[in-house]
Amino acid sequence: MDRPAAIYSDTVNLNGTVTQLSLLADGRLWWPEGGQRNLSIEKEVLGFTGDGPDIRLKTIVETEDGCCGGASRAKLVRNDVVFRPSSEETHRLWCQKLGEFIDSLGRPKRLFVFVNPFGGTKSAVIVFRDQVKPLLEDAQVQLTVQETKHQLHAKQVVQSLDFSKYDGIVCVSGDGILVEVVNGLLQRQDWDTAIKMPLGVVPAGTGNGMAKSLLDSVGDPCTVPNAVLAIIRGRKRKLDVATITQGETRFFSVLMLAWGLVADIDIESEKYRWMGSARIDFYALTRILHLRHYIGCLYFVPAPGFEAYGDPTSYPGSSNNKGSNSELIDEEPLKLQRLGYQGPEIDLENQSWRVLNGPFISVWLHNVAWGAENTKAAPDAKFSDGYLDLIITKNCPKLPLLSLMSDLNNGGHVKSPYVMYLKVKVLVLEPGPRLGDQEKEGIIDADGEVLARGKGSYQCEQKALMAYDKLQITVDQGLATIFSPI
């Protein structure tokens, strides 16, 4: 096959060999001799330096990494490719042509980076120092780094950040800092401009659901180098944002909302944090053996093709509850929230509402496919389809429920006859007490944090953003922008 035309070509000394090096129109660097004969600038060249007589290409290439049993897997390795142009003039032209081509790719040049030293295994500082920073420096990205000091710190920072100085915001953490950033952006007075700021995620926490969803969508492993490369390359995609409303209180979600079994496991297993990652499996087994059912109602507007679920009803109305205790989770007064984004404009009265009555074992609402690196909660979820994926379990014997939970790592649980899986445009959740014990209610979990605690629930004395009462979830299609490998 004929090679594309050369943008620039020169005789150079490459790794001690004199050869013809060409920058081709398709963005490859090509040379006829040597083991590796071409490099894709877009995929493999992070940046370059031209100090002295040599030009040093900062590259990242895939190599086969042998592992257990002789199997191998692709591993990304940083590597410098050094060549010496034939003269000062050709050196200047190489730097110019390489710089122009890299600039044409639209890569970010200035990033504001949050590093969360408290999340997950508390390794984010080391991950940033050893893996993230070297790659971004190779790509000649100017960095402003902020370690988060406390909960909601990232949210507070972005509420006053001067976005003219940056091309994106990166979160080196689990999913929590990303959620804080989105909430901070949408509570700004200039939210409609602020939310266009591209966001990046590097997995360095417990769940890493967003990073896993983004990388898995193109078949890439959920690793730090893959996540950083997606940011460096500067490709972006739109991301739906859900608005959870109770009275005048709002919370903006990009991952999930859970009530029932999943929320109970996620939040109550904190008491076994000393067990490490095994705490989730251990507590899931405990909760299944001592299964709870919750009374309640789900009102929803189904996506096209899902109209058969539930029974016809009318709009149930929004909650009059003001979201008690909000001042302890979100210190800004409600009048500040009113300056920001108020949620999507939907004529709620004139929708085709349906209702499902409990009791429920589990209600799970998802915006992206993966809730964590090992939990493919909603295999059909799309990043910006304008719908939320609703996964419901009402009645299920304990043995099939154990099997169902074990299928979460590949999304097979949604094929169970005990699971309802549908897409919705709007959901109103009306939570109630446990079946058989009216004095004990549940927990509502949004993006890994407690949104509401019912009476008699785990740590119910701690205050939460919203009351354990009716709340409404709407979705705004493609409201946010996120760096993505596609």
Image: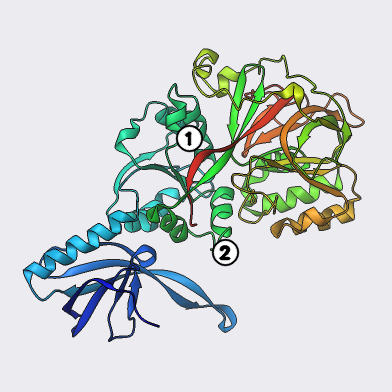
Which residue position is annotated with label 2?
Answer: 219
| Cα gap from disc 1 to disc 2, whole angstroms | 27 Å
Q: Where is residue 21 in the image (x, y as percent from the top left)?
A: 23, 77
Q: Of discs 1 and 2, which sits in the foreground?
A: 2
Image quadrant in which the N terminus is located:
bottom left
Between residue 401 and residue 83, name the one nearer to us.
83
Secondary structure under badge 2?
loop
226 relative to 150, above or below? below
Q: Name the residue under label 1.
A: 181
Under circle 1, the secondary element is helix
Q: What residue type is labelled 2?
A: Gly
Judging depth in this view, the residue of 370 and 480 nearest the camera is 480
User: Measured from the top left, where is residue 17 in percent x and y?
Assistant: 19, 85
Colour pattern of the rendering: rainbow
Label 1 packing within 10 angstroms: few (<14), some (14-19), many (20+)? many
Count of residue discs: 2
